[in-house]
Image (spheres, helix red, strand yellow):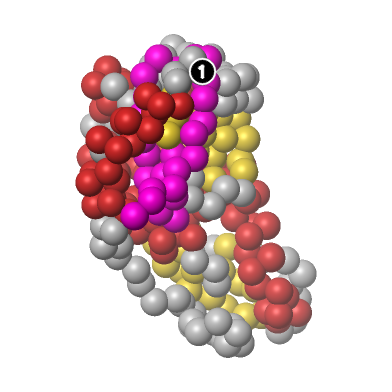
Amino acid sequence: MELDYTIIRSPKRRKLTITVERDRSVIVHAPETTPEEKIHQVVKAKRQWIYEKIHHPRKYRDLPHPPGKELVNGESALYLGRNYRIEVVKMGLSEIRFNQRFYIPAAHVGKRQEVLREWYIHRAEAKIIPRVKRHARELGVTYSKAKIVDNLYRWGSCTMNNNVNFNWRLIKSPTFIIDYAIVHELAHLIEANHTPRFWNIVRAQIPKMEKARIWLSENGQVLEEEI
């Protein structure tokens, strides 16, 4: 059986690595000068490991309500790792409000995905970006820009231009998950590859690193669900 994979080359990369994304796509990160034949040999040698990752069982949860169902009082939405009840307000409200529950104008119920997404993005910008600055200061690194982005299957990224990007869906997760994702990307400014040194840097800053990685592997699909 032929194994499909995508090659991403970088002049900064010194070591070839293989990752299996949550959509089960296979990405090979390689130094710019690595011959294609060498990449093919490494992928072939790692074939068993790759197949195990691709077919690893994932934990899925039911959607908060069946797709297309009208949003009603009492349903819930995630924010910072907790589910908060939704209350549909018929009058006196023009936008989503949050105060230990979500208050959604009845006029917006038909486009709940769009208005909730916009609310989440604004909260991610307000909550995550300042934490990026703090963690960068503690790590002693300098980044160019920090942005909240809409990326499925990737929680964060560190670009060749030293920009760090973070998926807005992280705002649904507990704070220690957000901190882990931030430090993970900032640590790439010190060590580009996932070497033992890289993981030691992350672990020193985030003692709950292993717990965070397990949490994301088990709950990542939940963060991606739409209301």
- The answer to whether residue 199 is seen in the rendering is yes
Residue at (38% x, 48% y) in the render: 3
Depth order, front residue of 19/33: 33
Depth order, front residue of 157/147: 157
Residue type, label 1:
Glu
* Mark 1, secondary structure of its residue: loop
Depth order, front residue of 155/135: 155
The percent position of residue 152, horizontal first and vertical second, equals 54, 52
Residue at (61% x, 49% y) in the render: 150
Name which quarter of the figure residue 47 lies in. Answer: top left
Where 227 sits versus 27, above or below? below
Depth order, front residue of 21/65: 21
**Number of disc labels:** 1
Highlighted range, magenta:
1-27
- 139 part of magenta stretch: no
The percent position of residue 56, horizontal first and vertical second, equals 26, 57
Q: Which residue is mark 1?
A: 32
Where 186 sits versus 149, above or below? above
User: In the figure, is residue 201 to the left or right of 223?
Assistant: left
- The answer to whether residue 22 is seen in the rendering is no
Residue at (33% x, 36% y) in the render: 43
The percent position of residue 148, horizontal first and vertical second, equals 61, 41
The percent position of residue 57, horizontal first and vertical second, equals 26, 62
Count residues near mark 1 (Cα–Cα under 10 Å), then give few for <14, some for 14-19, many for 20+. Answer: some
Q: Quadrant of the C terminus?
A: bottom right
Name which quarter of the figure residue 1 lies in. Answer: bottom left
Where 114 sits versus 91, above or below? above
